[in-house]
Image (tube, rainbow, N blue to C red):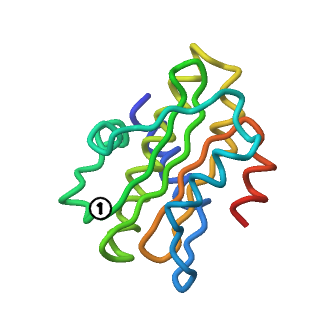
Amino acid sequence: MKRLTVLLCALSLCLLCACGGTAQPFATDLVDKILESETFSEPLEPLDDEIACFLYQLDAEQAGLTDLRAYRSSGATCEEVAVFTFETDEDAVDAQFVLAGYLAAQLESCRSYRPAQVPKLQHAILTQRSNSILLLVADDWSAAEEIVD
């Protein structure tokens, strides 16, 4: 039952996420702009590409991942930001489904042991533009949305 809930949450997140077919891809320097804003409750730490792929359950080669910038909380919060660039738009669509599953699993696990983090995950931004994806979980999600738009 728990697996079904996680899968349904992942599907829901995918359906709620914006897909921009002709929009310009996210530039990896967007991560810097977001990090410089006051949208996080603590400083985020950079993730090595290999570790990031492991955490996000992406096989870089199989997924067609060509570039990745990711930063994450040291563990006190669920805050994070990442921009993924893929070889094709189709690769990004496939990866978005995997990342939606990741967010759904994070949400499910936080419900029991970090309930204060749940609203951040409920307002997570997972958006595809062309062959890129932005994943953003912020303390101040309204400010984060303004930066992204």
Residue at far top of view: 113
Q: Amino acid at mark 1?
A: Leu
**Above or below: residue 23 compared with residue 141:** below
Residue 93 located left or right of residue 104: left
Badge 1 element: strand
Is residue 83 shown above or below 81? below
> If the image is split into quadrants, where does the C terminus sit?
bottom right
- Which residue is pictured at 66% across the width and 29% down the height? 118
Where, by quadrant of the figure, is residue 92 drawn?
bottom left
Task: Indicate the position of residue 134 as horizontal and vertical percent values.
Answer: 53, 58
Q: 73 or 107: which is nearer to us?
A: 73
Q: Nearer the viewer, residue 45 or 61?
A: 45
In the picture of the structure, the residue carrying the numbered disc 1 is 65
Quarter-wise, where is residue 123 in the image? Answer: top right
Disc 1 crowd rating (10 Å Cα; few below 14, some 14-19, many 20+) is many
Q: How many marks?
A: 1
Q: Position of residue 27 (x, y in %)?
A: 52, 67
Q: Position of residue 117 (x, y in %)?
A: 66, 26
Quarter of image, res 141? top right
- Decide: is 103 above or below 65: above
Quadrant where the N terminus is found in the figure:
top left
> Residue farthest to the bottom?
22
Is residue 17 visible to us here?
yes
Q: Residue at x 43, y 50 (%)?
A: 99
- Above-or-below relation of 96 to 40: below
